[in-house]
Structures are given as structure tokens and as C-alpha cells.
Amino acid sequence: MIATSRDPRIQLAHHLLGAVDIAADPALPPRVIRLVADGGRQFIAKQHAERDRYAAELHAYRTWVTHLSGHAPELVGRDNATRTLLLTALAGHRADTFAPGSPEEEVAHHEAGHVLGKLHRAKAMPLGGAVGASLAERFHGWIGRAVHADLLDAAEENLLKHHAVILGTSQMDSAMCHLDYQPRNWLLGDTFGIFDFEHMRRDARVRDFARLEFRRWQAAPHLRTAFFDGYGRSLNDTERRLLESFGAIEAATALVKGHQENDTALSAHGRTVLSRLA
């Protein structure tokens, strides 16, 4: 998407900020632009393609993100008709640009654990079975999509359904979760920042660790240690067992999304996680 004066993101910024310039930022997806206003203040304008994602992110900024004061962008304004948000821009370097094994990578994981702990503790709830049942229901939907696309053999389908049963019958802590918590959504600067709250909702607390476990930590366990040092406590035995079942969700969603988006790297990741589970 190329920004023009009639772009809803530019129009919203003009309405709220006055004159702005577009700052090149190749790391941002096409639906997101960085803007510079008078005095050098920087902002992010984001237009959603899907109304439910827009509504979810707007709700997150109005409610739960307030618990991350100083660690998350602030909502400056929105346009419901065009599904556009205007946010303050955080300073720092994206954590997915740090070299593997670098001190910066380890610091980012420690700070990420600390900030996620603040969010989880702000909106934690006691053990209950409703979260697991809801998760299992959604997971069965992903399994069904994978079967429909002929992405699983019978043994793999049965393995995933086995983990769905485990999730559906487990009691687990729930909390307000980011649900895409990984280095591409972290900024390491003077203050650690996170962004991209369009998936945010109440879910099983352990689920916010799953992508890190299966995309980063298994290959670099010292990052897991740094993260939970920052978080304030490690997983207990039950949570470690549950994390394996969340790996089944990771495998199924990666396979389906990789197939739908013709993303061979994501499909290969799904296959790798599935083989580890087997």
C-alpha cells in the first residue's frame, strides 16, 4: 500500500496532528506507516483490513494496554469507518534484528519476560477449566482446516486430537495475553517496548510462551532462562507438560497458515514442531 494524501492513515494524522511527513521504515508491513510531525515527534498509523482485528486492537489499547504504561504505544486517535489507528511510536531496535547469541538478544528476552509478567499479573485469574475447554474447541477448528487441506496423515491427526483432549480437560491459569509475543514485536531501547495488540485477549497464561518455546528457546535454552528470570518465576511441572500441548496448536496453525499464505518457511516450521511432538 502506497501512502497518498487521500490515504486514510494520512488523513487521520492530518486531522489530529497537522502536517506530517512519511518516514521510510522497511521493517513495517505495508498497512503500517511511520510519520513525523512538527518538532520531530514520531507516530505510527495502522489500517486494518479486517474489522474484528481493528475492534480487538482498539479495545486492547483502551483497556488492557494501560497496564503497560511506558512499555507500549499510546492511542492518539482512530477512524472507525476506515479501521485506522494512530499511535505514538516507540524508540528502540527491533529484537529480531539482534545477532543470535548476542548480549542484546539475551537482554531483550529478560526484559520481555519482565514486561509480560506485569501484564499477566495485572489481569490474572485463578485456575479454571473454562479456558482449556475454549482452547480445545478452537484447536479442533484448526485441526479440521488442516485435515480439509490434506496437510495431515491419520497418525498426525490423532496426535493433535490427543493434545486437544489434554487441553480440554486441563485446569490452567488464565491471564490477559498478547498472543503474538515474539522478538518481531519487541523494541529494545532506553525502555523496553512491545506493540501489535490485535490478537490480544484473555487466554491461558502459558500460551504466551509457546511461540518462544518452539521458535526460539529449544535452540537457545539460555534465552528461556533469561526470560523467566525477568518474568519472576519459572514454569512448574504441570505448565511444562501443557506447553507441549500448546506446541500442537503451534504446529497446526503454522501448517494451515503456511498453506494458505504459500509460506514455505512457516509450513516447514509446522512440520518441525509436529515431528518433535511425535
Image (cartoon, rainbow, N blue to C red):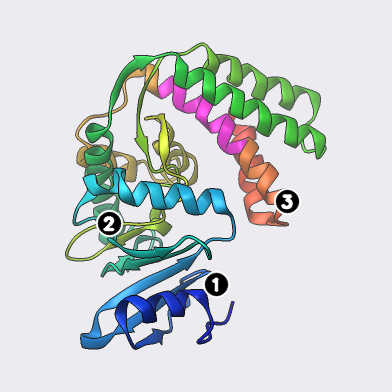
Residue 52 among those drawn in magenta: no
Q: Is residue 78 left or right of residue 67?
A: right
Contact? badges 3 and 2 (CB < 8 Å): no
Pick whichever of labels 3 and 2 is earlier in the sequence: 2
| Badge nearest the viewer, 3 or 2 | 2
Look at mark 3 in the image and give the residue it sits on: 260
Residues at marks 3 and 2, CA–CA distance in whole angstroms: 31 Å
Q: Which residues are magenta?
A: 240-251
Q: Position of residue 71 (x, y in %)?
A: 23, 55
Q: Position of residue 249 (x, y in %)?
A: 57, 32
Residues at marks 3 and 1, CA–CA distance in whole angstroms: 19 Å
Q: Nearer the viewer, residue 65 or 194?
A: 65
Contact? badges 3 and 1 (CB < 8 Å): no
Mark 2 secondary-structure assignment: loop
The answer, for residue 9, to whether it is visible in the render is: yes
- The amino acid type of the residue labelled 2 equals Ala
Look at mark 2 in the image and give the residue it sits on: 72
Mark drawn on residue 255: none
Q: Nearer the viewer, residue 86 or 146?
A: 86
Q: Is residue 24 left or right of residue 236?
A: right
Image: 11 above or below 275: below
Pick whichever of labels 1 and 2 is earlier in the sequence: 1
Q: Residue at x 22, y 66 (%)?
A: 189
Q: Residue at x 65, y 24 (%)?
A: 160
Image: 84 above or below 172: below
